[in-house]
Image (cartoon, rainbow, N blue to C red):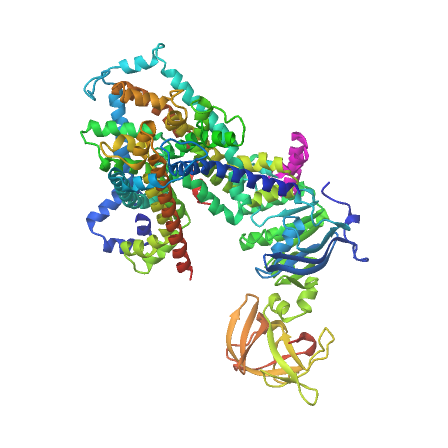
Amino acid sequence: MLLTSPAALPDPASPPKPILQLVGLRKSFGGFDAVQGIDLDVREGEFLTIVGPSGSGKTTLLRMLAGMDTPSEGNITLHGELINDVPPNRRPTCLVFQSLALFPHKSVGENIAFPLKVKGVDAAARKARALELMRVVRLPESYFDKNVMKCSGGERQRVALARALAYDPEVLFFDEPLSAIDYKLKKTLEKELKDLHRETGKTFIYITHSLEEAMVMSDRIGVMRAGRLVQVGTPEEIYGAPVDRFVCEFVGEVNTFQVKRGPDGAWNGTDVPGTFTLQPPASGAVLDEAFVVVRPEFMRILAPGESADNRLEGVVYNEYSLGSRIQYQVRVGAKVMLVELSRGRALPSSADRRVTLGWDAADAFTLES
Amino acid sequence: MEHRRTKAAIWAWTLFVLVAIYLPIVCGALASFNKSRYFGFPIRTYATEWWQKTLDSIEIGMIVKTSISIALLVTVFSVVIATFGALAFARYEWKGRKLYQKLILLPIFFPQPVLGLAMLLGFNAVGIQTSWMTAVFAHMVWIVPVVTLIIAIQVYGFDASLEEAAYDLGCSRIQVFREVTLPLLWPGIWSGMLFAFLLSWSNFPLSLYTTGADSTIPEWLYAKMVAGYTPMVPALGTMATLGAAALLLAGGLVGILARRRAAA
Amino acid sequence: MADLAIAHPERQAAAESPAQLRQDRLLSVGARCALPVALLLGIGFLAPLVAILGYAFATPRSFDVFSSFTLANFATLFDPANTVWLSFFWSCGLALFTVAILAVVAYPIAYGLNMVFGRWSALISVLFVFPLFVSENVRLYGWVLFYIRNGVLDGSLKWLGLPGGPEVLYTPGITLFGMVYTYLPFMLFPMTLGLALVPRDLVDAARDLGAGRLFIWREIELPLAMPGILIGMLLTFVLAIGATAEAKILGGQSIIVISHDIEIAFTYSQNWPLGSALAVVVTFFIGALTLFALSKLDLDRMLGKR
């Protein structure tokens, strides 16, 4: 049945056992390494999202997991069993394609019942199950005989989802299925997908280039770049403790500048003036040069007399409304710093454009340069 | 692996069919180098004398000239008509389009011997004397639809907003056609030209009824096959085949080079 | 370019003379582009068919087209004493067998061109197209040289000390062989186009949902490739109905096919009206079949609009 008992849900106390394990996974296409050595444990029942810019190898990774490509090197194990060469039709996994891959010559109901027909389920049982799944994905019963090509974008998503669920896979893969959907519908479908994940208790592996999508839905996020997994962690960890400048910039707009350790041991700015108080890098390495990253929402415009661990002098030369927030572009020497303030704390229009920026050491990251 | 075996079987089957397709052409080439007048295999004495005789024959020279003239005229007229025909087929939305798309296929879906006879009757009914020039027209009735389809495939891949952009940037309609439409359709037009020439070059059933007193290469070959075989028949047949192959090769190379230059 | 005119009504109005504007309203751009083709086919295709129709109702053994009207020619054709039905029967039978054999012969190749041959596909396609540029009687005569006594097959076998090749020339069987040979490209290319219409994703998806090879073929590939396969079948059937060269060159006139009958009426018997009546019957048969099949197809999708 679709709804699993609460016992199957991940227990937060003990880390759930891995359902899928990737060890040293590589894939090359005639000299080009699309995926270059990935190690990853996917926990049973989690919603894992792989994000990365286009060309980072995430689709290739997914196709290997689904069995449509075979790895050039490395192992994929499901419940501890090696599945590298198991064809997709023998894997208890199912992929929702970017194109959705709905069969245009079959109705909504026939599409959803397809995996059941493959298994040889009789027509009446197929129909009953398809209707049940249509309820789960919120499709009206009257759509059973509707031509899939006549369905709207959102309806097609739901058909594709129901078809994948009809296969009753242990792991569901998603290849950017929401990329061609308009913003508002996308938000609705994201939440529905999250609900569906909770209700079914199945393992979801989702790939996308949109971090926003990843943040909304995932239990964990893996960031991919040039065929490698750069960082895997909860949305909080990815946002709050990025391992390098790439993850940092991929996650959102940031202010960065370089520092160098002076003879007295103090950190002096290289491309901005001043001396700064920094946290040691998360990696624990001892550095002579470093990158400092401050998110715009942690940057403040200091009132006279207000204190902060670090400060910079600059001139406001642009401001943008982000709705509930306002972003300022502040020129500091040759660099431009971004500051985001909530609307209530906006600078009065008459205020002096010369400002002092400030932030506390705990709100910034120090990264190896 | 099962999959690999299927692939091997498909390769093997395809190569087998290809060999079968070229086998009779090779047989013809063999027969043309037979010294004796009558064919027997294995060939006892090889000779190039029949090739020499074919090249020296004044009659054959005229027939080749007729074939080339027909093919050249067919190519020029067909490509012009078919380019517009393809735009009507694939580019513009207009009222009669669906019907037009189907009607244009009818000459392709029609037995050529019957079409040739029908045209002979038509020419006769209006009192036109058939000659190689009527054959040009007859070939076009069949070749224009084929070339239209070939160019139409190129037109489908062509982004119509490019024409609108050029128009928006101040081009006149003629400039739009010359600067945007034509260069982008060129690969399709080029293959259309090759097809037009070569299909006319090899056509027999239409020529048979519409050339009147003139004769093309396939007609001459057929007449000699029925009565009066000499190894000049396979010799001329092989020459015509080699000529077509050379043209196709040269045309293909020009196409590839043009694309390289465009890409560079 | 009426569609451009929609985007620029003011410029259009300024640039065009009133006469041209009137013409715009009379014929859309598409229609004007189609005009040369339409004229060509009107004069070169429809008019001859009308001429045939005219002759079909003319006095037998005369040339009085459009000046006499009689049904005598059709009466002769449908007279049970006339053996023309035999030719029709042979043509249809041969055409059906040709279609059936070609479907089996061409399917693996079409599949290979789409899925297996990869970068070799273009070359292999050219190799299959090229024979179209060699006159069919040259190619068929090559088979005569292959199968004839003391020809390539017979001579080779004898040279190897074997009893020699089978006597296959001048039989209905070899006629069928020749038709399969000649019309292979006409089945292969529409079929390849049809198979190219099956998106790779759908096959992957079906496989991912547990379907085996045969199931995918029956449920996904075949139905989606059907338009192309049907066009190929129709084209080869129609062309095979009208084929004469195979029966004449390879078959040695051991059987008379329908278009050969038409030719005989026009040449030896000098009975143009009878030949025309026969041609009208054949044309009607082929035309009805073709128009019926084409009316079911969406050519935009077949040829590239995705």
Residue A365 to residue C201: above or below: below
Give coordinates of residue C199: x percent, y percent: 53, 44
User: In which quadrant is the C terminus of chain B drawn?
Assistant: bottom left
Q: Quadrant of residue A237?
A: bottom right
**Of residues C285 and A268, which is closer to you in this image?**
C285
| A117 lies above or below A361 | above
Which residue occupies the foreground of this view, C88 or A351? C88
Residue A177 makes an appearance in the image: yes
Side of A112 relative to A203 (left or right): left
User: Where does residue A7 sit, x and y in percent of width and height?
Assistant: 80, 48
A313 vs A365, left or right, is left
Instruction: Give the farthest residue toward the front.
Output: B45
The front one of A299 and B77 is B77
The stretch drawn in magenta includes residue A119: yes
Q: Tally the marks.
A: 0
For the N terminus of chain B, which image quadrant? top right
Image coordinates for residue B73, horizontal then vertical, percent = 26, 43
In percent of width and height, residue C77 lies at 33, 15
Q: Report if residue B136 lies within the magenta region.
A: no
Using residue B25 as the reference point, say whether residue B134 is left or right of it: left
Q: Nearer the viewer, residue A328 or B124?
A: B124
Above or below for C144 versus A5 = above
**Overall secondary structure of the magenta stretch?**
helix
Quadrant in the rendering for residue C38: top left
Q: Residue furthest bottom?
A: A264
Task: Give residue A239's quadrant in the image.
Answer: bottom right
Q: What segment is highlighted magenta in the picture?
A: A112-141
Residue that lies at the very extreme toward the top in this rendered image: C81
Q: Is residue A163 visible?
A: no
